[in-house]
Amino acid sequence: MSEHEAKKWMAKIRRFLLLDKIPPFPRKIIVSLLGGILLIAGIIMIVMPGPAFVFIPLGLLLLASEFNWAEEWAQKMMNLISRIRKKWRNRKRARR
């Protein structure tokens, strides 16, 4: 998955949550709280029942819309997901 695609997802999330209309400082606080809650909930869901594979990427992508460190992790995560999907498709083709 390209870096351009990760930035496209982050832009979609920012537009959906109307974050572009909020001034920078309050936006960082809101993104930190929401993204942190989603990320922590996803990590907890790894050991508890729940869709951790949904919450962790959402939390990272939300945090990546404001923080460079999260953008790097989100890019790594999206590359990993892309490789897993590619392997899955190849296995499905091989079974046919």
Image (cartoon, grey):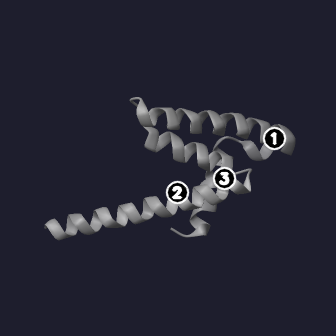
Q: Amino acid at mark 2?
A: Met
Residue under numbered circle 3: 70
Q: Residue furthest top?
A: 48
Q: Which mark is residue 22?
A: 1
Indicate whether 75 appears above or below 67: below
Crowdedness of circle 1 by 10 Å Cα count: few (<14), some, many (20+)?
few
Q: Nearer the viewer, mark 3 or mark 1?
A: 3
Position of the C terminus by quadrant:
bottom left
Q: Residue at x 18, y 70 (%)?
A: 94
Q: Residue furthest left?
A: 96
Label 2 close to label 3 by CB (< 8 Å):
no
Observer-nearest residue: 9 or 49?
49
Q: CA distance from mark 2 to mark 3?
A: 10 Å
Q: CA distance from mark 3 to mark 1?
A: 20 Å
Q: Earlier in the sequence, mark 2 or mark 3?
A: 3
How far from the left and from the top, in percent, is residue 63? 67, 46
Q: Amino acid at mark 3?
A: Ala
Q: CA distance from mark 2 to mark 1?
A: 27 Å
Q: Earlier in the sequence, mark 2 or mark 1?
A: 1
How far from the left and from the top, in percent, is residue 86? 35, 67
Corner quadrant of residue 22? top right
Observer-nearest residue: 24 or 60?
60
Left or right relative to 36: residue 51? left
How far from the left and from the top, in percent, is residue 17? 67, 40
Helix, strand or loop status at disc 3: helix
Indicate whether 15 appears above or below 8: above
How far from the left and from the top, in percent, is residue 49? 38, 29
Q: Earlier in the sequence, mark 3 or mark 1?
A: 1
Q: Nearer the viewer, mark 2 or mark 1?
A: 2
Residue under numbered circle 2: 77
